[in-house]
Amino acid sequence: MIQTNRLIIKPLSYCELLKYIANDHSLEKELGLSDTNITITPEFREVLEKIIIPMVLDNQSNYQYFTLWTIITKAENKMVGDLCFKGLPDAGNAIEIGYGTYEDFRRNGYMTEAVGGMIEWARQQHGVDAITASTEKINLPSMQVLQKNHFVKTGESDDLFHWKLAL
C-alpha cells in the first residue's frame, strides 16, 4: 500500500479484483469505503477478465505488477480511480503504467499525485530502471499527468504519444 498527502493507493488481490468487476459495492464494503459509482466499459471488462485477473492469479508472488491499484481519497474515503503496471520489467528494466480517474473525480490532481506515488514505489523495486506510458494524442489531461511527473516524450504512433521516466 502507498500513501501520499491525500491518497491511499492499494493493489487489489485476486479476490478483491473479483469484487471490483462485480461492481456491486462489495469491494467498498470489504475495504470499509464509501460507495463509488464506477463505470466498467465493455472493453475494460474484457481486459480485466482475459488479462488482469488471470495474470494476478498466475503471479501471486509479484501480483503488484499485474493488478489494478485502486486510488482512495483520505478525505472522502472513496475510490477515485485506478492505476496498473502492465507486467514485469522488460529487457530494458522498464515497466509500463496505465491509469484512469473516475469521471466524478477528474481535474482534482488525484492522478498526478497517484502517479507520483507509484513512481516512488517503482524506485524501490529491484530491476526497475524506468517507467513508460502511452497517451492518446487528444488526451491532454493524461499528458499533463505525465509531464507534471517529469516523463519525457520519446516518440509517437498514429494516435499515441509515448513517454518515459528514467528512475
Image (spheres, rainbow, N blue to C red):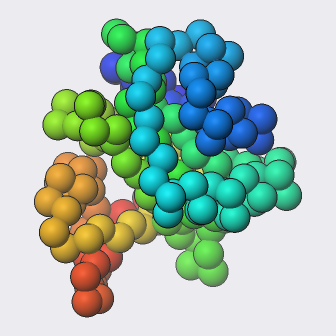
Query: Could you tell whether 124 is left or right of 107 in the image?
Result: right
| Figure quadrant of the C terminus | bottom left
Examine the image and state in which quarter residue 106 appears. Answer: top left
Which residue is situated farthest in the bottom direction here? 158
Query: Could you tell whether 56 is left or right of 67 in the image?
Result: right
Which residue is located at x 34 percent, y 38 percent? Answer: 102
Examine the image and state in which quarter residue 52 appears. Answer: bottom right
Which residue is located at x 62 percent, y 14 percent? Answer: 29
Q: Position of residue 62 (x, y in %)?
A: 76, 51
Confirm whether residue 8 shows in the render. Answer: yes
Query: Could you tell whether 24 is left or right of 58 in the image?
Result: left
Which residue is located at x 24 percent, y 56 percent? Answer: 142
- Against 100, residue 143 (above or below) is below
Which residue is located at x 72 percent, y 39 percent? Answer: 18
Q: Position of residue 13 (x, y in %)?
A: 73, 37
Q: Nearer the viewer, residue 127 or 32?
A: 32
Q: Position of residue 155 (x, y in %)?
A: 27, 84
Confirm whether residue 116 shows in the render. Answer: no
Total marks in image:
0
| Figure quadrant of the N terminus | top right
- Against 89, residue 54 (above or below) is above
- Against 129, residue 75 (above or below) is above
Q: Position of residue 113 (x, y in %)?
A: 31, 36
Examine the image and state in which quarter residue 164 appears. Answer: bottom left
